[in-house]
């Protein structure tokens, strides 16, 4: 990755973005002064401003800093070759402001000036934005959007179950899986206990067959439970409003589930076209969900990370060590991309079921009294080092090869696994 110096740019610009307008501070090396301006957040205004810069500073690069890594402004500016974008963490700007403004005063032009000043004085500590290929960025957005849709599904499912418990709790016991089209279709057809108890046995059987339930013992068990169920309440003042809400929630869940399926199909297609798909598919427990997420976590640019420790810190997996005097303490890394950390931690939890050494490590740390989440984060820390080496060398993960390496080093983990 190219290292920039402030002198490489004719002008250094800080942008304090907002929904309706953007405050801009331009620092010129020639005049050594700041020029302030405001532009609209509309696409045509951003386009005119970027082209005006190109006319004023022909054949020269311009450094632009912003408290964003993605979003409308970044998407708009990324297409201009004469602009080099430097994302700045919002907390960096906030702490820089507090260091020199003890009153706590805050203003948009001032924040824009702070960002241009950070470019002038601390460009060596900032990393320019180097977007991955369009295909990888599409996959990255798809997997992140899917994760959000799954969270929405969980939230809606919990709300649906809570509402059913108010007047129709029996249906929760009749179906093991709640986030299925079978469960939602049953509620649509029979939204309360009274309606389903009046249905004929043949009607219920036909419904289950139509929804691919073939086990006759299970069907009979459900029908018997339906016919013998006792109502929680017969008060229409309770049943009617809750039933209306339940029907609305089931419609939302159906839309969500269809959207997740559409995302799964698109992710599968685009992941299969990626060069490194065989590498990440070789990881234990990765599967169709986590393999694409891990691929976009590392990306295509092998020069992006020089060591495994860089991605461990960036992803928020590596803990933070603080020292003061004779005291030292370790704590959770607060500032990091949440989705990236989720990807590593959630996948590490899956590897306990599919990897021999990961399961052994989990059991070993559990016996030491460590909590589940702490063990999984430590496991993710180890996995990143392994994946990083595979990624750098462009080689697929092989469990037997790693176990041989552990044996060669005389790892106590293998001794524990054998004795356990």
Image (cartoon, grey):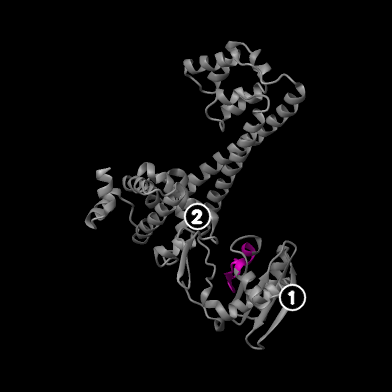
Q: Mark 1 points at which residue?
A: 37
Q: What element carries label 2?
A: helix
Outermost residue to the right = 237
Q: Of residues 79 and 151, which is closer to you in this image?
A: 151
Residue drawn 61% across the image and 28% down it: 184
Q: Which quadrant is the C terminus positioned in?
A: top left
Q: Give the image location of residue 78, x and y in percent.
A: 60, 66
Q: Which of 397 and 331 is in front in this view?
A: 331
Residue for badge 2: 341
Give the percent coordinates (x, y) of residue 330: 47, 62
Image quarter of residue 64: bottom right
Compared with 255, 339 (above or below) is: below
Q: What element carries label 1?
A: strand
Which residue is located at x 44 percent, y 48 percent?
Answer: 371
Please give the range of residues in magenta. 74-91
Which residue occupies 58% across, 47% down?
A: 148
Q: Mark 1 or 2, which is nearer the eye?
A: 2
Separation (CA) of disc 1 from disc 2:
38 Å
Does 88 lie within the magenta span?
yes
Place of residue 382 in the rendered image (x, y in percent of width and height, measured from the top left) = 38, 56
Q: How many marks?
A: 2
Res 61 seen here: no
Q: Measured along the vertical axis of the image, is residue 119 above or below residue 216?
A: below
- Is 401 included in the stretch rendered in magenta? no
Q: Do residues under tags 1 and 2 come within 8 Å of each other at their CB atoms? A: no
Residue 230 % position (x, y): 63, 16
Disc 1: CA contacts within 10 A as few (<14), some (14-19) or many (>=20)? few
Question: In this view of the protein, can residue 267 be seen by the observer?
Answer: yes
Direction from residue 111 to residue 273 in the image, left or right: left
């Amino acid at each position: 990755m190219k290292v920039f110096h402030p002198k490489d740019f004719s002008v250094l610009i800080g942008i304090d973005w907002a929904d309706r307008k953007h405050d801009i501070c331009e620092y010129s090396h020639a005049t050594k002064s700041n020029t302030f301006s405001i532009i609209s957040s509309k696409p045509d205004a951003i386009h005119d401003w970027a082209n005006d810069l190109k006319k004023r500073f022909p054949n020269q690069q311009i450094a632009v800093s912003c408290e964003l890594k993605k979003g409308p402004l970044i998407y708009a500016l990324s297409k201009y070759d004469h602009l080099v974008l430097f994302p700045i963490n919002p907390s960096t700007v906030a702490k820089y402001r507090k260091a020199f403004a003890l009153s706590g005063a805050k203003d948009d032009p001032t924040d824009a000036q702070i960002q241009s000043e950070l470019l002038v004085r601390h460009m060596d500590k900032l990393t320019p934005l180097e977007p991955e290929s369009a295909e990888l960025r599409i996959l990255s957005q798809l997997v992140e959007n899917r994760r959000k849709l799954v969270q929405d599904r969980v939230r809606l499912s919990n709300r649906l179950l809570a509402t059913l418990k108010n007047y129709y709790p029996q249906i929760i016991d009749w179906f093991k899986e709640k986030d299925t089209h079978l469960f939602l279709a049953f509620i649509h057809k029979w939204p309360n206990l009274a309606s389903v108890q009046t249905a004929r046995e043949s009607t219920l059987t036909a419904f289950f067959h139509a929804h691919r339930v073939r086990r006759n013992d299970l069907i009979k068990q459900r029908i018997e439970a339906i016919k013998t169920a006792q109502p929680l309440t017969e008060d229409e003042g309770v049943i009617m409003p809750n039933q209306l809400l339940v029907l609305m929630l089931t419609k939302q869940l159906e839309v969500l589930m269809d959207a997740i399926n559409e995302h799964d199909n698109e992710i599968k297609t685009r992941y299969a076209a990626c060069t490194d798909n065989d590498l990440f598919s070789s990881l234990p427990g990765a599967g169709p969900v986590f393999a694409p997420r891990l691929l976009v976590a590392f990306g295509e640019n092998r020069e992006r990370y020089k060591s495994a420790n860089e991605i461990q810190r960036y992803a928020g997996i590596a803990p933070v060590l603080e020292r003061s005097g004779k005291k030292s303490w370790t704590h959770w890394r607060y500032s990091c991309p949440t989705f990236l950390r989720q990807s590593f931690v959630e996948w590490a939890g899956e590897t306990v079921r599919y990897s021999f050494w990961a399961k052994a490590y989990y059991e070993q740390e559990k016996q030491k009294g460590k909590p589940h989440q702490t063990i999984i984060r430590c496991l993710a820390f180890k996995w990143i080092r392994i994946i990083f080496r595979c990624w750098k060398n462009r080689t697929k993960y092989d469990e037997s090869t790693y176990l041989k390496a552990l044996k060669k080093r005389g790892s106590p983990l293998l001794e524990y696994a054998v004795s356990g």
